[in-house]
Image (tube, grey):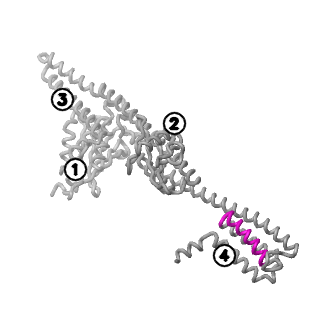
C-alpha cells in the first residue's frame, strides 16, 4: 500500500494536480486582495514550474487546466464557465496564449536541460572508459573493459570477435554458448562490409545478436555483438550513440595494442639482429685471437721442439694454457649471457666461504693479473654466505678480469667485504682511468665498451652485463662508483646473506 502511494505521489499527473490545487487554494485565500490578472500570473507561475519540472506535455495540460480553473473560479459569474464581462474574456484569451507559450518554453528548457545532463553523463562515462582503455596493457584487459561497460550501459550479453591472420573471426573470450550459423553470417557481414547487422537491421534480422564493426585506422579489427532480452525495449537514440562511441574507443584501443605489438616485435627483431651481428664480431675477433695464439704456439712446439731450449718450450706451453683459459672465459660468458637472456638461470644456494670463492675466481686469472696484486680485506664479523657460490664466483671473476684489463699493470686491486644488515657488500677498487658518469649505466648492456677503453684491451663487452644478470638472479644489486680518493673505479655488489641463520666463520 505504501509503495503504491509512493508511485502515485511520484507520478506526473499527481504533481500537476497538486501544483494547480495549491495555486487555486492560494488564489482563493487572497481573492479579495488580488485581481483577476494577478491570479492569472499565479497560475502562469504554476504552469512554468510544471514545465520546468516535467516537460512540454505536462505544461500544456497544466495550461489548459489552469485556464479552466481561472474561468470557473475567478471570472464573473463564479462557478460558471460563461463570462459576462468582455475584459474577463480578454484576460482569459491572453492567459491561454501566454500559458501555452510559457509552458512550451519551460518544457523545452527542461528537455534541453535533460539532454545537457545526459550528454555530460555520457561524456563522463566515455572519458572514464577511455582512461581505463588507455592504461590497459593487454588485449584481454581491453576486451574485458569494453564488455563490462557495454553490458552496464545497455544490459544484456556482450561479446567481441577479433579477426585472425587467416581472415576468420574468433571470440576474444570464452562464450557462454556457441553462435548459430545465422549469427556468424551476420558477424561476417558486419566485419566485411563495415555496417551493422543482425537483430534490428535488414541484414540477418532474425539473428538474436546485434553486430557492430570495430574499424581501426587501417582495417576492420573485428565486431562487437550485443544480445538483449527479446522483450526488452528498443535501444534509445542516446544509448545507440553511446554504443557507437564505445565501439570506436574499443577499435582505437585494440588498434593501439596491435600497433604496439608490431613495434615490439620489430624492436625484438632489430635487437636480435644487433645481438647476432655483435656475436659474430665477437666470435670473429675476440674468440679467434686466443685460438690463433694457441695454434701458433702449438705449431711452433710441433715443428721446432728439438731446436727450442726448455725455457722457450715452457713459455709456449704457458701461452697455450693462458690463451685456452682466456678462450674458456669468453665461451663461458657467452653461455652465461644466453642463460640470463632466456631466463634459464636458477640459483642453487649452499653455505660457502667468500675467501674460497675469491681464490677460485683468481685461479684462472693469473695471466690477466700478471704482477698485479689483489688485496683482500674482509671485516672480522663477515659471515658465511648461503648463496649460489658458482654464480657469485662468476661475478667476482668477471669483475676482477675487467678491473685488471683497464688498469695499469703496476697498480694493485683491492677487494673489500663487510656485512650491512641482511646483506653482504663487496667492493672492488682499481686505479684505472675509470668510467664517465654518463656511461656507467650503459656499460651494463650487452657488448658495450667505453670508447676510450676500446684501444686498451680486448674483450667482448659482456663482462659487466653478465655481472648484473648474475647478481640480479642472486637477488642483489650492482653499481659503479668513484674509486678511493676519487681515482679509478669501484664496483659495488650487494647480495643477500641468505639462509635461515647467518653464521660467522669462527662458529
Q: CA distance from mark 2 to mark 1?
A: 53 Å
Residue 13: x percent and y percent? 64, 70
* Circle on res. 218: 2
Q: Which residue is mark 4?
A: 18
The residue positioned 82% from the left and 68% from the top of the image is 93
Q: Which residue is mark 1?
A: 387
Q: Which residue is mark 3?
A: 321
Question: Mark 3: which secondary structure?
Answer: helix
Q: Give the number of the mark in front: 3 or 4.
A: 4
How many neighbours does mark 3 have within 10 angstroms: few (below 14), some (14-19), or many (20 or more)?
Answer: some
Question: Mark 1: which secondary structure?
Answer: strand
**Could you tell which of marks 2 and 4 lies nearer the N-terminus?**
4
Is residue 451 in sight in this rendering?
no
The residue positioned 43% from the left and 35% from the top of the image is 167
Q: CA distance from mark 1 to mark 4?
A: 84 Å
Q: CA distance from mark 2 to mark 3?
A: 62 Å
What segment carries the magenta color? 54-73
Question: Mark 2: which secondary structure?
Answer: loop
Q: CA distance from mark 3 to mark 1?
A: 31 Å
Majority secondary structure in the magenta region:
helix
Q: Give the number of the mark in front: 2 or 3.
A: 2
**Could you tell which of marks 3 and 1 lies nearer the N-terminus?**
3
**Could you tell which of marks 2 and 3 lies nearer the N-terminus?**
2
Q: Is 65 drawn above or below residue 389 in the view shown?
A: below
Q: Is 220 drawn above or below residue 67 in the view shown?
A: above
Question: Mark 4: which secondary structure?
Answer: helix
**Could you tell which of marks 2 and 1 lies nearer the N-terminus?**
2
Contact (Cβ within 8 Å) of mark 2 with mark 3: no
Is residue 500 in sight in this rendering?
yes
Amino acid at each position: 500500500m505504501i509503495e503504491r502511494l509512493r508511485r502515485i505521489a511520484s507520478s506526473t499527473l499527481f504533481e500537476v494536480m497538486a501544483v494547480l490545487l495549491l495555486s487555486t487554494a492560494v488564489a482563493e485565500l487572497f481573492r479579495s486582495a488580488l485581481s483577476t490578472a494577478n491570479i492569472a500570473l499565479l497560475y502562469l507561475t504554476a504552469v512554468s514550474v510544471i514545465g520546468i519540472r516535467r516537460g512540454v506535455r505536462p505544461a500544456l495540460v497544466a495550461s489548459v487546466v489552469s485556464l479552466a480553473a481561472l474561468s470557473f473560479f475567478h471570472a464573473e459569474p463564479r462557478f460558471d464557465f460563461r463570462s459576462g464581462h468582455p475584459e474577463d474574456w480578454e484576460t482569459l484569451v491572453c492567459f491561454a496564449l501566454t500559458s501555452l507559450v510559457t509552458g512550451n518554453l519551460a518544457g523545452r528548457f527542461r528537455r534541453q536541460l535533460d539532454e545537457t545532463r545526459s550528454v555530460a553523463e555520457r561524456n563522463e562515462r566515455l572519458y572514464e572508459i577511455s582512461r581505463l582503455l588507455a592504461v590497459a596493457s593487454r588485449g584481454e584487459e581491453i576486451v574485458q573493459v569494453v564488455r563490462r561497460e557495454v553490458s552496464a550501459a545497455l544490459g544484456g550479453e556482450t561479446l567481441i570477435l577479433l579477426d585472425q591472420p587467416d581472415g576468420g573471426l574468433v571470440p576474444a573470450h570464452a562464450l557462454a554458448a556457441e553462435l548459430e550459423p545465422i549469427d556468424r553470417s551476420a558477424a561476417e557481414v558486419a566485419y566485411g562490409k563495415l555496417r551493422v547487422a543482425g537483430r534490428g537491421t535488414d541484414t540477418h534480422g532474425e539473428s538474436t545478436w546485434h553486430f557492430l564493426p570495430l574499424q581501426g585506422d587501417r582495417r576492420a579489427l573485428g565486431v562487437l555483438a550485443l544480445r538483449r532480452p527479446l522483450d526488452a525495449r528498443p535501444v534509445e537514440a542516446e544509448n545507440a550513440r553511446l554504443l557507437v562511441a564505445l565501439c570506436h574507443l574499443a577499435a582505437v584501443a585494440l588498434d593501439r595494442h596491435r600497433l604496439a605489438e608490431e613495434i615490439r616485435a620489430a624492436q625484438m627483431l632489430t635487437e636480435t639482429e644487433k645481438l647476432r651481428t655483435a656475436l659474430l664480431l665477437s666470435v670473429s675477433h675476440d674468440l679467434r685471437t686466443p685460438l690463433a695464439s694457441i695454434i701458433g704456439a702449438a705449431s711452433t712446439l710441433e715443428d721446432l721442439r728439438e731446436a727450442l731450449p726448455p725455457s722457450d718450450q715452457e713459455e709456449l706451453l704457458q701461452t697455450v694454457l693462458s690463451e685456452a683459459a682466456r678462450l674458456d672465459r669468453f665461451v663461458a660468458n657467452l653461455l652465461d649471457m644466453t642463460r640470463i637472456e632466456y631466463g634459464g638461470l636458477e640459483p642453487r644456494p649452499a653455505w660457502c666461504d667468500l675467501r674460497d670463492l675469491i681464490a677460485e675466481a683468481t685461479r684462472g686469472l693469473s695471466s690477466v693479473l700478471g704482477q698485479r696484486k689483489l688485496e683482500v680485506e674482509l671485516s672480522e664479523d663477515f659471515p658465511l654466505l648461503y648463496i649460489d657460490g658458482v654464480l657469485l664466483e662468476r661475478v667476482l671473476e668477471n669483475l676482477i678480469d675487467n678491473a685488471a684489463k683497464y688498469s695499469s699493470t703496476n697498480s694493485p686491486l683491492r677487494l673489500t667485504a663487510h656485512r650491512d644488515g641482511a646483506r653482504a657488500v663487496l667492493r672492488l677498487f682499481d686505479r684505472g682511468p675509470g668510467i664517465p658518469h654518463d656511461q656507467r649505466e650503459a656499460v651494463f648492456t650487452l657488448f658495450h665498451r667505453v670508447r676510450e677503453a676500446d684501444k686498451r684491451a680486448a674483450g667482448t663487452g659482456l663482462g659487466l652485463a653478465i655481472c648484473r644478470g648474475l647478481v640480479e638472479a642472486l637477488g642483489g644489486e650492482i653499481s659503479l662508483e668513484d674509486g678511493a680518493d676519487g681515482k679509478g673505479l669501484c664496483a659495488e655488489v650487494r647480495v643477500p646473506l641468505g639462509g635461515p641463520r647467518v653464521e660467522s666463520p669462527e662458529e
